[in-house]
Amino acid sequence: MMVIVRFVAAAVLLVAPHAQAADVEPATFAWRGTLDTAGQSGLVRATVPADALARLQSRDAADLRVFDGQGRPVAFALSQPPRPAEQQRQETAAFRALPLHAAQAGAKLPRGVTQLRIAESGERRSLWVQMGQDGPQGAAPGSQRLPAALFDTRQQKDPVSGFLVRARIPANVPVRFTLSTSADLASWTAVPVQGRIFRFEGDGAPANDRLELQAPLRLEDRYLRIDWSGHEGVAVDAVVGLLKAAQPEAAYPALALPAPVADGPSALEWQLGFATPIARLDLGTARENTIVPVRVLGRNQPSEPWRWLGSTLVYRLGAAGQESTNMPAVLARPSVRWLRVEASHGARLEGLPLTARVLFEPVEVVFPAGSATPYQLAAGRSATPSAALPLGMLAATTTTRVDALPLVKVGAVQAPRDPAGAAWDAWLPRGVDGKTAALWLVLGAGVLLLGGVAWALLRQLNAKEAQG
């Protein structure tokens, strides 16, 4: 049976290129890149660069093609490297927060507590924590509860790559947490962490309860400590670990957006030249000590109302060299032609140096390489039907896993066309796209034509009346 499947798949590889439209030629695409196969034959794969994804005119990559050295279409399939979905990320059991208290000099520690030591500002401090399952007992007279908590994570065997923090925090304030671990409650190792916890007020306002680690962390036989000094009104109840993915995630191809167009003091807009869905939006600023909550909106035509895509917090906080910045906002893979960022909660974007990058889901093309080099990857062509074959059809021709196929690189690139839109778009009134302008132009020409015909008929009638 497997032999028959491979025979049919191989036959398809031979006839599929001829079934594609003959007028789809490499020169008609907005972007072309040479594929360096290095003399390899058989199935290979190539990662589609961000610059190519930024030329696609269809949300499903229908205008992607592979051509051989003679400009003939080559059978290919699209593949997305495996990526664990955000909602499917495995979680650990919740670790209960054990409040930390300062041990007063000369004071007797409460009964049944555990003492620990930390280094703070170059000095060693003595603390205590109630480790019992019934929770902390009443604090000793004169003791001080600290903005910190201990978590007994010694039984956690699998490495974690992040944490969900279950905490009560003040509204509209990004709270900074620092993490450290210890095996003996005396020597502590700092854990680099990304992100801040925040909750802004209002429907659809930005919120985040996740801290991401810069590297996977092993917690087995170790305690975890979380500190949040400098923030009032914070109470941490528990943390949940996010397990490290079984396979490393493929990088998101990223495209830096050009300078935006301001729409008043609180909104910025970009006209995009692609239909590729946006997986994440990375907003940032170089201005220190900045906090700006924003809404992200999009649309496909200037005549359409803006639709909400998400919300996030743009921030850069902390001392120079130790600043914490916001993470990219996760979007629901919208395909939009116009992007808008609006400040919320009374903030403004006027005068703020804001940078923006769009991050795409990684895409690979899988195709059979041979001697007809150099192969080309082409992208960006309006109204182009899809020509990609089912991935399983090509995979059936080999016993090698798709993700283990040789990876070829994209070499020289030709991109003669501007992906930001037609050259005349800059001359159009704000909020008017090329298609709308063309329709109005045709309508105006029609009105002028009808007016000319009516004027000519009127002249003829006047001439006949004069002769009569």
Image (cartoon, rainbow, N blue to C red):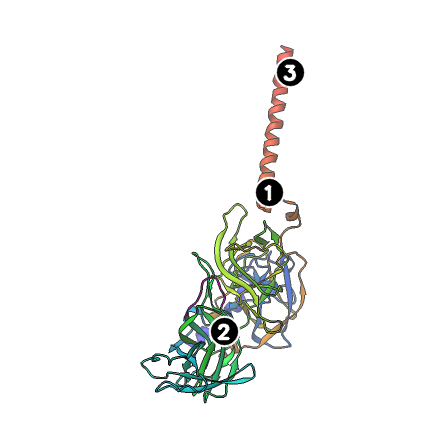
**Residue at the left extreme?**
134
Q: Which residues are magenta?
A: 167-174
Mark 3 residue element:
helix
Q: Nearer the viewer, mark 1 or mark 3?
A: 1
Amino acid beneath label 2: Ser
Question: In terms of sequence position, does the residue under pointer 1 or pointer 2 come before the other?
Answer: 2
Q: Quadrant of the C terminus?
A: top right
Dividing the picture into quadrants, the one containing residue 465 is: top right
Can the viewer see residue 117?
Answer: yes
In magenta segment, residue 171: yes
Q: Which residue is mark 2?
A: 229
In magenta segment, residue 323: no
Can the viewer see residue 245?
Answer: no
Label 1, label 3: how far apart the Cα atoms are = 39 Å
Question: Residue 52: image x %, image y %?
Answer: 60, 63
Q: Are marks 1 and 3 in contact (CB under 8 Å)?
A: no
Question: Residue 438: image x %, image y %?
Answer: 60, 42
Mark 2 residue element:
loop
Dividing the picture into quadrants, the one containing residue 356 is: bottom right
Amino acid beneath label 3: Ala
Q: Are marks 1 and 2 in contact (CB under 8 Å)?
A: no
**Which numbered disc covers residue 437?**
1
Q: Nearer the viewer, mark 1 or mark 2?
A: 2
In the image, residue 366 sits, relative to residue 379, either above or below, namely below
**Which numbered disc covers residue 463?**
3
